[in-house]
Image (cartoon, helix red, strand yellow):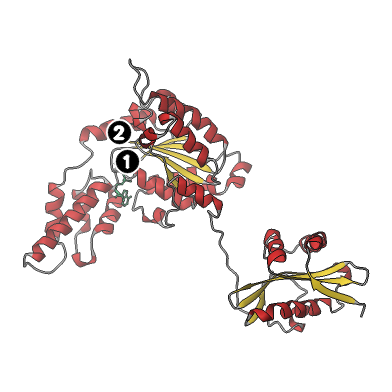
Amino acid sequence: MKEILFRDYVASDLDALMVLWNQVVDAGSQPVYSLSEVVASCEKDVAVVAVSAQGEVVAVAVARAAHDQGWIVFFATHVDHRKQGIGDRLLAAVEQRLAPQGLTRISILVPDDQLNVGVLTRAGFKDKKHLRYFEREIPVRGKEMATLRELGGRILSRDLWGGIAGMVEEKDLLERRLVLPLSNTSMAEQFGVEAPRAIVLFGPPGTGKTTFAKAIASRLEWPFVEVFPSRLAGSPEGLAGGLREIFEKISELDNAVVFIDEVEEIASQRGGEPPSPTQGVTNELLKLIPAFRERPGKLLICATNFIRALDDAFLRHGRFDYVIPIGLPDAEARRSIWEKFIPESAGELDLSTLVEHSSGFSPADIEFAARQASQMAFEKAMQGGKHTGPAMSDYLDSIASTKTTVSAEVAEAFRQDIENLSRT
Ligand SMILES: Nc1ncnc2c1ncn2[C@@H]1O[C@H](COP(=O)(O)OP(=O)(O)OP(=O)(O)O)[C@@H](O)[C@H]1O
Ligand SMILES: [Mg+2]
């Protein structure tokens, strides 16, 4: 066998590493670890190269230790130097360097279509059958977390979308118009679909606008950043400057759902003498939205109970892709909302009757009525009554005493708003 020297990797071996990396990739193999991870391990973990008599690097093996296990993160022999037993000796050299770290085993993941694994079995590695590799990318990491904290943003739990009971039509619309193009951008582009950048949700109080905004963020696995324009008053540059600063910070994030609730407070009809103090903010927001739209990966959601109060310029085409009504829950939605708030102890209930009697209730009204029934039953039990959960009569009493948030007039106004202003 020709003379081969094994030594630790040094920074000047990077070019040779790149040659080997490209050979692996050109052969159609998808390395398990990324190049940046491999290079990082070369610098701070264990990396050994095999050098030919001509001084050429002909093979490299890179490994790192994690707890009591060593992982080979990259391992390749130059195509002109295979089948010479270099790989076996290289693995042995890596093992020698890892052993003093108290490791109990060394593992290597290879793509399942990689054929030349003989070197591994020769070097004593066992092929662990019936193992599959799963991975998931962490959506927000590192320095983005600091920006997110500064903005008071957060990563919401991943199950909020599933937690929205009923509202099948709204969910279906949001899924098709927002979630699909935003999570499959390149496919959408191929079809000439531009992913939405900004939407308005409108509807009577308590119908679930905030809930939907959060659920969309959760569904997309994007951080949720709520902007409170009214809290910007303390900013040295005033409300408008504060808003501008926040949007600048937001642009540092790769992805975000940006939420402005009760947007009518800052984007109501302009004009009037003297101009209202929020007029500057309205103007600023109108300017910020086009710039916001230019950067992909973010979605602005504005919510309002009072869409007709919004400035005309605000709703004009080009700013918001969709203006979507979120209405009162239908029977199916009411049923699931009731189910969500009725405790197990309630036993058998006639749900259909509750659904029927709560027609015109918002989700928030149902939640209120359900909790009130629980409270009434609980108080009775504490006063020495039966120790059973809330009964049908508790629910019916509670429904009867609940004042609905959405009056007939409000419902009618909403119907007109859908006709005049919605854009779906
Ligand atoms: N589809 C739903 N399923 C279950 N609970 C819901 C649903 N929609 C809303 N809720 C609940 O109803 C309450 C009110 O919802 P939310 O705050 O999202 O309404 P909103 O439209 O933002 O109200 P507002 O106009 O007052 O801001 C919340 O407690 C929420 O959890
Ligand atoms: Mg809300």
In this view of the protein, can residue 62 be seen by the observer? yes
Q: Position of residue 105 (x, y in %)?
A: 64, 81
Which residue appears at 62% of the width and 46% of the height?
Answer: 186
Q: Secondary structure at mark 2?
A: helix
- Seen from the viewer's position, the closer of residues 58 and 132 is 58
Q: Do the CB atoms of the residues marked 2 and 1 lie less than 8 Å apart?
A: yes
> Quick one: which residue is furthest to the front in this view?
236
Circle 2 is placed at which residue position?
414
Circle 1 is placed at which residue position?
327
**Relative to 69, is 367 above or below?**
above
Task: Give the position of the N terminus as an image quadrant.
Answer: bottom right
> Quick one: which residue is furthest to the left in this view?
384
Which residue appears at 51% of the width and 40% of the height?
Answer: 249
User: Looking at numbered disc 1 in the image, what kind of residue is underneath it?
Assistant: Gly
- Seen from the viewer's position, the closer of residues 340 and 237 is 237
**Relative to 198, is 141 above or below?**
below
**Relative to 327, is 98 above or below?**
below
Where is ligand 2, by quadrant?
top left
Q: Is residue 152 left or right of residue 273?
A: right
Crowd tier of the residue under label 2, counting other residues whose Cα lies within 10 Å: few below 14, some 14–19, many 20 or above:
many
**Relative to 406, is 64 above or below?**
below
User: Looking at numbered disc 2 in the image, what kind of residue is underneath it?
Assistant: Phe
> Quick one: which residue is furthest to the top in this view?
273
Q: Position of residue 272 (x, y in %)?
A: 33, 17
Q: Is residue 195 left or right of residue 112?
A: left
